[in-house]
Image (cartoon, grey):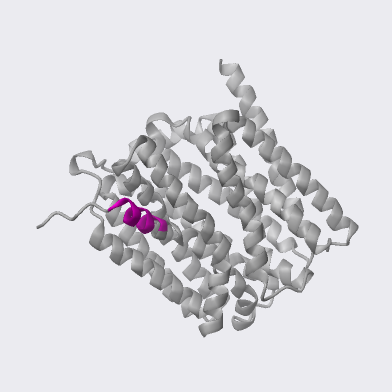
Amino acid sequence: MAKRPALGMVEFVLLFALVNCLVALGLDALLPAMRMLEGALNVSDPNRIQLVIPIFILGAVFGEIIAGPLADAYGRKVVILVGLVIFCLGSIISMQASSLDQLLLGRIIQGFGVSGPKIASRAMIRDQYSGDAMARIMSFIFMIFILVPMIAPAIGQWAIGIAGWQAIFVMYLVTAGSGFIWLGLRQGETLPPEKKLPISPTTLAANIGLIVRNKQVVAYTISVGFVFGGVLNYLGTAQAIFFDVYDIDKQFPLYYAILAGGIGLAFFANSQLVTRYGMHRLAFMALWGSIFFSLIMLFAAILYSGSPPFSLFMAGGFCIFFCNGFLFGNLNTMAMDLMGRVAGLGASVVSSCSSLIGVGIALAIGPFYDQSVIPLYFGFLISGLVGVTLLTLSARLERAEV
């Protein structure tokens, strides 16, 4: 068999950006269809439709726990390809849903499937690149990553205009299928047979024990989970807020993109500032900033009976998302810095546990949505307060160990 040619830099970046974008696309492209799904599936409680967002993440939680060990044992490529097939299966079930329960089943299967490409593709990148070259590749991929949440609702709204809400799931099928064919034909396995690690329940349990006994790792993981929970709550109620509170429908993708731009701007700013100020200082500053802006917006929401002026809503939201944009990368990196030899498994544990916490927060806050923005800002405020408390405790633990 002839050896496959190595992918060039541009093709490699585009391929892995496509495979990795399924998470953001799976969340954000569906947002414009929320009210349509409510009517099409005869959902009696409007707040229940929010479940299509956290249930997707819940599926990914369980997938991420096993994707890392499977990628180490059987290879990166097979885990990505199988994950894409499972994602497509979930898309087909969702597309044919006649009830909310059937849609939720499809969404949890989608989330489970997408965890394979998410975890194994990062390992595949690490297999082929290291040091500055890997940093460069990841920078290019994250640049595309930033754009996806900004444009995904517009893509979803465009698909709805063509063939209804089912068209969004057809788009998911086309995207995942394209990634399957492209990666299957062009990208070889990157894990040599001699480096495969058989799955050992005893070893896995021991390594997980090492991770969860590290109090600083636990603190960072919980912090990420609460921050993610605030964002998930926003995702679940975003279209309802824009429509119910501000009577915005067709322009929803535009305003959503503007707020998402706050996170994108933070990613860029963090890359320029982190070497000068350090992850810990930037994380503290971002958490205090999130608390400050959440308090202002919460007071404004109460003052205006749950509906502050739209210009204030947009300005405050942009500032909160800008602060949160600093937190995801820095808090995750702070946790990973403490992993040592269990970094691969650690990535799965931190990602799955923080996602599970985030889902719990979103499910706890979501039912309180009452056609006002008060629950939204309350969620962001709690997330910031918990994060600051845990980072302060973590800093004290670090000083005590010195």
* Position of residue 380 measured from the top left corner of the image (x, y, whole percent): 71, 49
Residue at the far left in the pictured view: 1
> Which quadrant of the structure image shows residue 136?
top left
Q: Residue at coordinates 42% horizontally, 59% vertically from top-left?
A: 114
Residue at the far right in the pictured view: 303
Q: Is residue 117 left or right of residue 305?
A: left
Q: Is residue 167 magenta?
A: no
* Position of residue 146 measured from the top left corner of the image (x, y, whole percent): 53, 54
Is residue 328 depicted above or below 233 in this figure? above
Q: Quadrant of the C terminus?
A: top right
Q: Is residue 42 left or right of residue 5?
A: right
Is residue 347 depicted above or below 92 in this figure? above
Q: Quadrant of the N terminus?
A: bottom left
Q: Is residue 26 left or right of residue 369?
A: left
Is residue 194 depicted above or below 47 in this figure? above
Q: Residue at coordinates 48% horizontally, 59% vertically from top-left?
A: 23
Q: Magenta part of the protein: which range?
A: 8-17
* Position of residue 102 measured from the top left corner of the image (x, y, whole percent): 51, 74
* Nearer to me, 209 or 375: 375
Number of labels in the image equals: 0
* Nearer to me, 132 or 170: 132
Q: Residue at coordinates 74% horizontally, 63% vertically from top-left?
A: 369
Judged by its main secondary structure, the magenta piece is helix
Whether residue 133 can be seen here: yes
Q: Is residue 153 left or right of residue 138?
A: right
* Nearer to me, 66 or 115: 115
Whether residue 232 can be seen here: no
* Position of residue 220 measured from the top left corner of the image (x, y, whole percent): 57, 36
